[in-house]
Image (cartoon, helix red, strand yellow):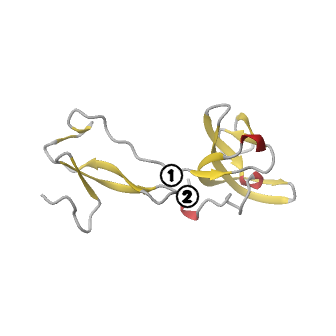
Amino acid sequence: MKNVLKGSRALLVGGALLTGALTVTAAGTATAAPQSSGDSAVSSSRGVAGAPAPSATVATYTVNVWARVNHRTGPHTSSSLIGTLGTGDNPHQAQCWIYGDTVTAEGYTNNIWIKAYNKAAKKWGYSSAIYFKGDKRANLPYSAKC
């Protein structure tokens, strides 16, 4: 069996053929989110026989806030408060952006929320994109939609 299969998303690992979607990180590195191809050397519940199932890599981006902003469990002003993200905590890691409640503050109106990591609370949550430096999506690419 060849190690490269043209025209398909497959990965040969230790003699086991894994197929699935590819994930590209912000740095441009592609990683596989493999799924079993039905090859007899692959266990359906654990990936390669005896090895833990592989997990998909989620792209993360670096973002900065320009003013303290509430950090919530969902992209809504009514979602539970996790804490705040502040300028002293910069930079922050973000995974994606999503449409949520419309927020008007600091002379701007926007309904985009950024899913970012709160270092103090050690939790992922959502904050209005108004408070992030950059464009209306905090410079996250359009493809990074949650």
Image quadrant occupied by the N terminus? bottom left
Tag 2: residue type? Ala
**Residue drawn where x is 76% and y is 41% of the image:** 88
Q: Which mark is residue 7?
A: none
Q: Is residue 54 left or right of residue 99?
A: left
Mark 1 neighbour class, 10 Å CA radius: few under 14, some 14 to 19, many 20 or more: some
Return the x and y of residue 85 as percentages of the image width and height: 73, 41
Q: Is residue 53 left or right of residue 64?
A: left
- Marked residue nearer the N-terminal end (1 or 2): 1
Residue 45 appears in the rendering: no
Q: Which residue is mark 1?
A: 59
Separation of residues labelled 1 and 2 (CA atoms): 8 Å
**Residue drawn where x is 68% and y is 32% of the image:** 120
Q: Which residue is mark 2?
A: 144
**Residue drawn where x is 26% and y is 57% of the image:** 10
Q: Secondary structure at mark 1?
A: loop
**Residue drawn where x is 68% and y is 46% of the image:** 91
Return the x and y of residue 126 as percentages of the image width and height: 66, 44
Return the x and y of residue 45 as percentages of the image width and height: 26, 36
Q: How many marks?
A: 2
Q: Are marks 1 and 2 in contact (CB under 8 Å)?
A: yes
Snapshot quadrant of residue 50: top left
Q: Secondary structure at mark 2?
A: helix
Tag 1: residue type? Ala
Return the x and y of residue 43 as percentages of the image width and height: 20, 38
